Image (cartoon, rainbow, N blue to C red):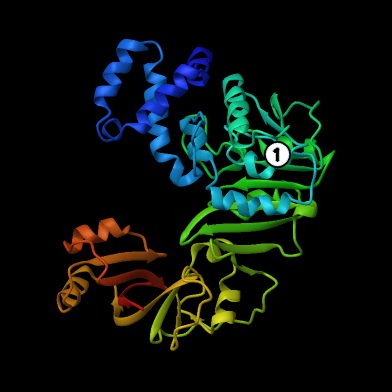
């Protein structure tokens, strides 16, 4: 986006174009007529307007009400879901003068940064978008918007810091490798800790803990899921950190499990009546033993995230785990599996895997059975062998 496009979008005329579009049901359903009209009236700005209209169709699911906002594709993609951002913001409430060092379009700053705080963005156009959006989200706020590189040694970081680095490599591909992110945390963190140790860092859930350890911080790692989807991992340091080292949090229920919860030595046993599949946040946080201790499960394999029990656990939240009753279990063989599935009446199957070399799509092509959820086939490894487990959800 150019400065001139941004100025048009911020202008009364540009804002009226948005309003006209969203007030016209026919335009929302079939925007081609409006686009042709815009091309005649605003030929230089029509591309920016159309892009905004598209983003405003998809962004509310993640960001809530976007009325009056100016969005970017990268900003929407990287932004934290509103409910998750609200959960993260709770840890910052006891601090004044909070700094968001990687603010982007402001989606996280709106709930995390206090009125005495500041937001930092290195790109001139994005910084102006950031200022505009904060004026829409928090019109009474006095948050300071600073256009600067967060690696600038002159920055005063305040009492607490939030960071959400861009997790893409130079070719624009998503990456879990921290040394490829922007800004480089291995360079930035030492500069910040000269002033404050109260830092929260949003990282990819796929990033391993060994990479975080290299930052040289004492930290709590919190893996956050929205329902069954893992959304992000937060690294908490200083007074933002609690007494635990690992935490799995499942929203919107605010269910959690930590490495301070009771833990026993979990046995590896043959499959029992039920298979239990814990939420991925629990597995990413390395808390499978604590989960098994709380809910009375044993493991099928020491390294696989499917566990087993004779009694369905009473989960406090519907999204803590999925449970399945075993109907058939055998070593994986496509012909045998297809024959076994033909013996059950249903309209389709769902395939799920842990520790299995082929993807569900690859196996489905071999089985030539339609998608569905009448039955579930769990594909997994137990010891050196691959297994298929035909189940029904309970």
State whether residue 11 is above or below residue 378: above
State whether residue 271 is above or below residue 251: below
x and y, in percent, of residue 354 in the image: 41, 65
Q: Residue at coordinates 18% horizontally, 71% vertically from top-left?
A: 338
Q: Is residue 1 visible?
A: no
To which quarter of the image does residue 254 belong? bottom right
Tag count: 1
Q: Relative to the observer, which residue lies in front, 245 or 355? A: 245
Q: Is residue 345 visible?
A: yes
x and y, in percent, of residue 159 in the image: 81, 42
Residue found at the far bottom of this picture: 310
Quadrant in the picture for the C terminus: bottom left
x and y, in percent, of residue 287 in the image: 59, 69
Q: Residue at coordinates 63% horizontally, 40% vertically from top-left?
A: 110
The residue under label 1 is: 186
x and y, in percent, of residue 309 in the image: 45, 85
Q: Relative to the observer, which residue lies in front, 27 or 241? A: 27
Circle 1 Cα neighbour tier, 10 Å, few/some/many (<14 / 14–19 / ≥20): some
Q: Relative to the observer, which residue lies in front, 183 or 242? A: 242
SS at mark 1 in the image: helix
143 to the left or right of 204? right
Q: Residue at coordinates 49% horizontally, 30% vertically from top-left?
A: 71
138 to the left or right of 3? right
To which quarter of the image does residue 353 belong? bottom left
Q: Residue at coordinates 61% horizontally, 38% vertically from top-left?
A: 165
State whether residue 81 is above or below residue 181: below
State whether residue 206 is above or below residue 320: above
To which quarter of the image does residue 30 belong? top left
């Amino acid at each position: 986006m150019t400065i001139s496009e941004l100025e048009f979008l911020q202008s009364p005329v540009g804002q009226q174009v948005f309003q006209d579009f969203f007030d016209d049901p026919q335009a929302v359903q079939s925007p081609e007529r409006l686009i042709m009209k815009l091309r005649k009236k605003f030929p230089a700005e029509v591309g920016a307007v159309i892009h905004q209209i598209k983003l405003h169709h998809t962004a509310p699911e993640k960001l809530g009400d976007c009325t009056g906002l100016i969005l970017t594709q990268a900003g929407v993609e990287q932004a934290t879901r509103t409910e998750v951002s609200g959960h993260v913001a709770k840890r910052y409430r006891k601090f004044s003068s909070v700094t968001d060092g990687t603010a982007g379009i402001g989606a996280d700053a709106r709930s995390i940064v206090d009125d005495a705080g500041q937001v930092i963005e290195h790109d001139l156009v994005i910084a102006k978008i950031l200022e505009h959006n904060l004026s829409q989200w928090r019109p009474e706020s006095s948050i300071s918007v600073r256009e600067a590189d967060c690696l600038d040694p002159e920055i005063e970081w305040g009492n607490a810091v939030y960071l959400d680095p861009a997790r893409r490599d130079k070719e624009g591909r998503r990456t879990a490798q921290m040394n490829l992110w922007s800004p480089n945390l291995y360079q930035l963190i030492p500069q910040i800790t000269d002033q404050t140790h109260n830092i929260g860092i949003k990282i990819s859930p796929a990033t391993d803990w060994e990479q975080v350890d290299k930052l040289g911080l004492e930290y709590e790692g919190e893996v956050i899921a929205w329902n069954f989807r893992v959304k992000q991992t937060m690294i908490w340091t200083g007074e933002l950190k609690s007494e635990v080292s690992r935490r799995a949090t499942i929203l919107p229920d605010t269910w959690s499990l930590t490495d301070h919860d009771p833990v026993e030595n979990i046995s590896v046993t043959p499959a029992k009546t039920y298979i239990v599949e814990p939420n991925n946040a629990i597995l990413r946080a390395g808390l499978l033993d604590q989960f098994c201790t709380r809910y009375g499960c044993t493991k099928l394999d020491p390294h696989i995230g499917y566990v087993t029990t004779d009694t369905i656990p009473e989960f406090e939240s519907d999204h803590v785990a999925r449970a399945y009753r075993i109907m058939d279990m055998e070593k994986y063989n496509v012909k045998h599996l297809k024959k076994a599935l033909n013996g059950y009446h249903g309209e389709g199957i769902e395939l799920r895997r842990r520790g299995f070399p082929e993807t569900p799509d690859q196996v489905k092509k071999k089985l030539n059975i339609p998608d569905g959820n009448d039955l579930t086939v769990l594909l997994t490894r137990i010891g050196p062998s691959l297994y298929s487990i035909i189940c029904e959800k309970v």
